[in-house]
Amino acid sequence: MALILASASPRRQELLRNAGIEFTVRPANVPEDVFPGETPEVYVRRLALAKARTVFEKHPGDQVLGADTIVVVDYSIIGKPVDASDAIRMLRLLSGREHRVITGVCLLTPNSEPSRSAREDIRVETTLVTMTPLKQEEIVAYVAHGEPMDKAGAYAIQGLASRWIPRIEGCYFNVVGLPIALVDAMLRAASG
């Protein structure tokens, strides 16, 4: 039984490789709209499950790992920026403040009985991140660099933005895009 990552994220792939976890990639393209009244935790759980189920339907004999990461500030969900002005808006919002990075992780494992559906393990990891106050010119230069464009919250803690993150509480790898210790615990629970 192979592990399939239901994500095209290069950061998630790198984190799994660095942890020595073998996997193949089969991206799941699911709508990422937030439903009215949906809490951040419910949202990431729903998306992680939807991504995993989409891939599991095509690979029912394998384990499938789905994940979704968001940034939350003032109870507002911040995903990936749609363009440069959106990235600037997001970084202004995060500047000088604490925010939460929340990742939903879903592991689907085939049941030994073919008549039963997959075993679902869905968990959520939250990390508190503090960002220093940023000057407008710093934000504009960072966005022009291109690094924030495919990242939730419009920044990469492992990249240039690392200089603006003096403090985190929780899992660093969660902020990068996948809480590896949590994933390992889920894989161990599924095999035990």
Image (cartoon, helix red, strand yellow):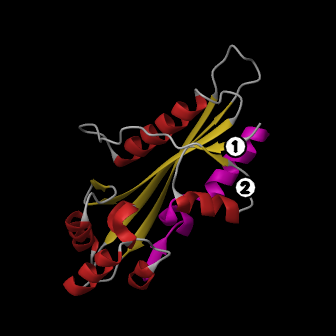
Q: Is residue 188 left or right of residue 41?
A: right
Q: Amino acid at mark 2?
A: Ile
Look at mark 2 in the image and give the residue it sits on. 21
Look at mark 1 in the image and give the residue it sits on. 3
Provide the residue span drawn in magenta. 166-192
Q: Tell me the distance, in whole angstroms, between the alpha carbons under discs 1 and 2.
A: 9 Å
Q: Quadrant of the C terminus?
A: top right
Q: Quadrant of residue 153?
A: bottom left
Q: Nearer the viewer, residue 27 or 45?
A: 27
Q: Is residue 80 magenta?
A: no
Q: Is residue 41 left or right of residue 115?
A: left
Q: Amino acid at mark 1?
A: Leu
Q: Residues within 10 Å of mark 1 (few under 14, many from 20)?
A: some
Determine contact: label 1, label 2, CB under 8 Å. Answer: yes
Question: Residue at the spot x=75%, y=60% of the render?
Answer: 20
Question: Residue at the spot x=48%, y=65% of the render?
Answer: 175
For the stretch drawn in magenta, the main secondary structure is helix
